[in-house]
Amino acid sequence: MTIRYFGTDGVRGRVGEHPITPDFMLKLGRAAGAVLARGEKRAVVIGKDTRISGYMFESALEAGLAASGTNVLLLGPMPTPGVAYLTRTLYACAGIVISASHNPYYDNGIKFFSADGEKFPDDVERAIESELEKPFSTVDSAKMGKAARVDDAAGRYVEFCKGTIPFGTALSGLRVVLDCAQGATYKVAPSVLRELGAKVYVMGDQPDGLNINDQCGSTHPQAMCEMVRQKGADLGIALDGDGDRAILADANGEIVDGDEMLYIIATARQDAGALQGGIVGTVMSNFGLELALGKRDIPFVRTPVGDRHIHKALVENKWKLGGEASGHILCLDRTSTGDGIISALQVLEVMIRSGKPLADLKSGMRKFPQTMINVPVSAEGPSKMAESVRIKETVREIEQQMNGQGRVILRPSGTEPLIRVTLEGRDADVVQRLAEQLADTVREELKG
């Protein structure tokens, strides 16, 4: 069965356009309840970010789940990783997040977590889609589900986050700029840092339903960097709208991305004898990370883009740490999914323990210059690219010129008719020139 609605990270799209409509969410709630609960009276938890459409979709999902005979626990605004955690600790049969992550307010989506707080495998998504094809129905009135609100959800999650660094670790003396992206972390993230003793300058904590991710957060960290410089802070933390990503800034207001965060956490754990294997990155992880880890004899493997692939590789290798340059980092010895607050805390704990500023901690890794060019192509472009002899020859020639000191990545976009042409190397000018050369070849071969 072909999956129609579920993408790489749940169901997502523009509000009001199928399937991101209240009638579809009603049906999705019933279908999910029929598959996930299967007559059990264990509840499904629902959390959401701060988008205005979250109210509408929360009500529709609640009604659909109740129609299937499934009880519902409402968490209110809650970071995606917080929903994963509470799904486990409340012994729910599944968790649902209403969020479009780092997208603008006019998008929304649905993510599911298993009872273990992990993303669903494809077969469960197929089962839900199969149930969606059936006519809408409700169970007998006496068997309908009930809904209740979890009033202490935020406090439970705050305590969990604090517990992911060693007991007694105090952030006293650290001055932190925190950008909550006008999103789901706007209450919990400041509480975590303040309760651990940090001096926190908060921005992006006044959500109005429309300003989530709007020129703020991990996708727009410039304002956070500027405030770090203005306040003379030790570092900055920019989260995204649903709280599963974090991008940092050092005391100079210079960005510390997910690759550099991975390097800091990995090397600190190696020094402490607690690394538990190697590191998982993606095809887009900077080549400088791979080289820096190699110098420390830390194994490194790459997967396709997406935390689902990273998680799978970590489990298969029995490793614990992986992530993406976007700041989506998995610390599976701390929690079951990517968590911006917890990832940032791991770096802060290294700063406190080592007594070193963030700029020094990242200095062992030199990022390679990277250029990405988006080339519009026809719908058949990706399949034609795999057959193009000329593109293959151009890639081979460029790789020979790089002589093992760079990478070439050709990747179709998952959402647009584009080929993403990405090059990395030691010399920024050479990388730019070779990227343009390859992009021209792709453009000529796969005219859009």
Image (tube, rainbow, N blue to C red):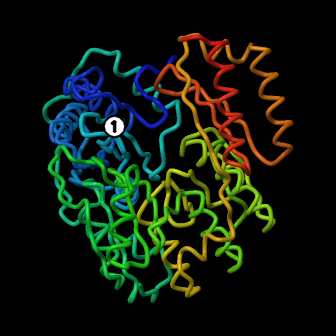
Q: Which residue is pictured at 38% across the width and 60% down the height?
A: 238
Front residue (pair 400, 12): 400
Where residue 339 sits, quadrant-wise, is bottom left
Q: Is residue 194 above or below residue 264?
A: below
Q: Which residue is pictured at 46% across the width and 64% down the height?
A: 248
Front residue (pair 291, 127): 291
Q: Is residue 87 visible?
A: no
Q: Which residue is pictured at 81% across the width and 42% down the height?
A: 402
Q: For this view, does 146 lie left or right of residue 161? A: left
Where residue 85 sits, quadrant-wise, is bottom left
Q: Which residue is mark 1?
A: 110
On the image, the x and y values in percent for residue 274 come to 67, 74
Where residue 389 sits, quadrant-wise, is top right
If the image is split into quadrants, where does the C terminus sit?
A: top right
Secondary structure category for the residue under label 1: strand
On the image, the x and y values in percent for residue 145 come to 20, 40
Q: Is residue 416 above or below residue 427?
A: above
- Say how many tags the image has: 1
Q: Which residue is pictured at 35% across the width and 15% down the height?
A: 133
Q: For this view, does 103 lie left or right of residue 254? A: left
On the image, the x and y values in percent for residue 61 come to 23, 35
Amino acid residing under circle 1? Ile
Front residue (pair 288, 196): 288
Q: For this view, does 298 lie left or right of residue 65? A: right
On the image, the x and y values in percent for residue 306 come to 54, 41
Within 10 angstroms of label 1, few (less than 14), some, or many (20 or more) residues?
Answer: many
Q: Is residue 32 visible?
A: yes
Q: Is residue 3 above or below residue 143?
A: above
